[in-house]
Amino acid sequence: MKKLAFTIVMMAAMLTACGKSSHDQHSGHKDMAAVAGQSQADSVKAILKLSTDKPEPAQDTKITVQIQDKDGKPIDNFDVKHEKKMHMIIVSKDLSFFNHIHPEYDGKSQFTITTRFPSAGQYNIISDFAPTGIGALSKSQWISVQGTAPAAKPIEPDAELAKTVDGKEVSLSFDQLKANTELSLTFTIKDAQSKEPITDLQPYLGAVGHVVILNQEGEEYLHVHPTDEQASGPDAAFMTSFPHSGIYKIWGQFQRDGHVFTVPFVVNVP
């Protein structure tokens, strides 16, 4: 079957006010090292292929990502970041669907994974990886899944930053909430029935939790890690900086009793 190939636009591993995305960022400040990193990122190409040119909902679809230098030569060596050589985030256009998966590396510049898309419509496939000697990079590509897409769900800020997921009450707080400013965000996790603090969170991919943030358009991307990776609850604190004002969706991921649970919040950043 004919393969569908996309040339991926590489996204720099830094957060700027004019940038499209960021990876593993805790601050919006640029320096000479960041500029050098941008130059290195521009020298890397990535090719994304799907196993079919017409992916369908609820059908297995193989995704292949091949990493090359600017001359088309394969890049073979990658650093392990939080127990994986690649993290892949898949979100629907309205951000109602979220999937954090980990393609396998074949040792020859190529990552592969088989997954399913829940329904027709557009999806953003975002991949994080770190070529050795270059550092963390992010890339993104929108794809279309065949069929009639369901009505888009509105992306509206939550009136209250507290939700119950899998028997756990999770609240989100900020020390401040303002665009282009370094800030902390803290998840506090309690038992939903007893209201007792949960203090036995297990490491998820080597840390107490992971946070992924996307703006309303699905273009501004932040993958944030905790300030204290060895924490076990009830608090899990993170540092980041929102590149622009506007509406953002935040997914916090944590693990307890061998089960990973994901908590989404939507905020309006002034």
Image (cartoon, rainbow, N blue to C red):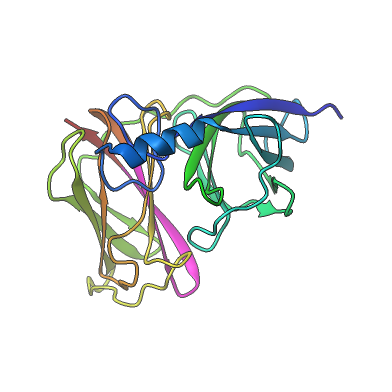
The majority secondary structure of the magenta stretch comes to strand
Quick check: 168 left or right of 128?
Answer: left
Where is 199 relative to 19, above or below?
A: below
Residue 194 makes an appearance in the image: yes
Quick check: 74 left or right of 93?
Answer: right
> How far across and how far down the image is residue 157, in percent?
26, 35
Q: Residue at x 68, y 49 (%)?
A: 76
Instruction: Using the rendered view, name the quadrant where residue 190 is placed.
Output: bottom left
Instruction: Using the rendered view, name the quadrant where residue 200 is placed.
Output: bottom left
Q: Residue at x 26, y 44 (%)?
A: 27
Quick check: 64 left or right of 83?
Answer: right
Q: Is residue 196 magenta?
A: no
Q: Residue at x 50, y 72 (%)?
A: 258
> How far across and how far down the image is residue 234, in percent?
25, 70
In which quadrant will I find the C terminus? top left
Q: Which residues are magenta?
A: 250-265
Where is 146 relative to 255, above or below?
A: above
Identify which residue, 267 or 152, lies in the foreground. Answer: 267
Where is 49 relative to 171, above or below?
A: above
> How far across and how far down the image is residue 80, in percent?
54, 59
> How far across and how far down the image is residue 4, in percent?
74, 26
Where is 109 relative to 72, above or below?
A: below
Q: Is residue 261 magenta?
A: yes
Point out the residue furthest to the right here.
1
Q: Residue at x 23, y 73 (%)?
A: 197
